[in-house]
Amino acid sequence: MIQTKRNYKATIILDNRGKEDSVDQIIEGVKKEISAVQGEVTAVENLGRRDFARKTDDKFPAGVYIQVNFAAPAAAPAQLHERLRLNATVYRALVESV
């Protein structure tokens, strides 16, 4: 049976404090997480470093935001969200259908 793929947009805040990896290397890791849930990345946009409107940690007042557009099966967003939650370089993730 052929699985139909839907289009999604993920907005992700990266946490690279104390990490030797560059932002580009972290983005490559996020792309691998998406491909692990049978997703195909179509576009990646680095939105840069932005201050948080509400700080939850005084030692982390800003983060690097990225947006990733991808196509994946319907079950992929929940799986991806769980995988990103366990990833130490991802601070927050929001996956929405486009």
Image: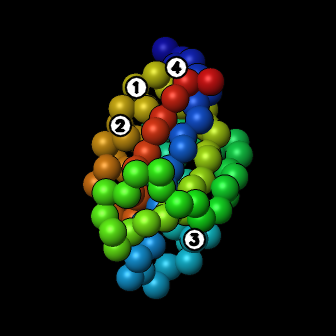
Task: Give how far across and how far down residue 8 sits, in percent.
Answer: 58, 31
- The foreground one among 72 and 52 is 52
In the image, residue 22 above or below residue 63: below
Q: Which mark is residue 75?
A: 1
Within-10-Å neighbours for mark 4: few <14, some 14–19, many 20+? few
Q: Which residue is mark 2?
A: 79
- The foreground one among 2 and 18 is 18
Q: Residue at x 38, y 82 (%)?
A: 18
- Identity of the residue furthest to the top in this view: 1
Precedes in sequence: disc 3 or disc 4: 4
User: Does dot 1 land on a helix, a strand or a loop?
Assistant: loop
User: Does dot 3 land on a helix, a strand or a loop?
Assistant: helix
Within-10-Å neighbours for mark 2: few <14, some 14–19, many 20+? some
**Mark 2: amino acid:** Gln
Task: Give how far across and how far down residue 24 sits, in percent.
Answer: 61, 70
| Mark closer to the observer (3, 1) | 3
Distance from the alpha carbon under mark 2 to that under mark 4 = 16 Å
| Mark closer to the observer (1, 4) | 1
Q: Are marks 3 and 2 in contact (CB under 8 Å)?
A: no
Instruction: State whether residue 29 appears in this view.
Output: no
**Mark 1: amino acid:** Ala
User: Does dot 4 land on a helix, a strand or a loop?
Assistant: loop
Q: Which residue is mark 3?
A: 23
Q: Which mark is residue 3?
A: 4
**Mark 4: amino acid:** Gln
Q: Residue at x 57, y 71 (%)?
A: 23
Precedes in sequence: disc 2 or disc 4: 4
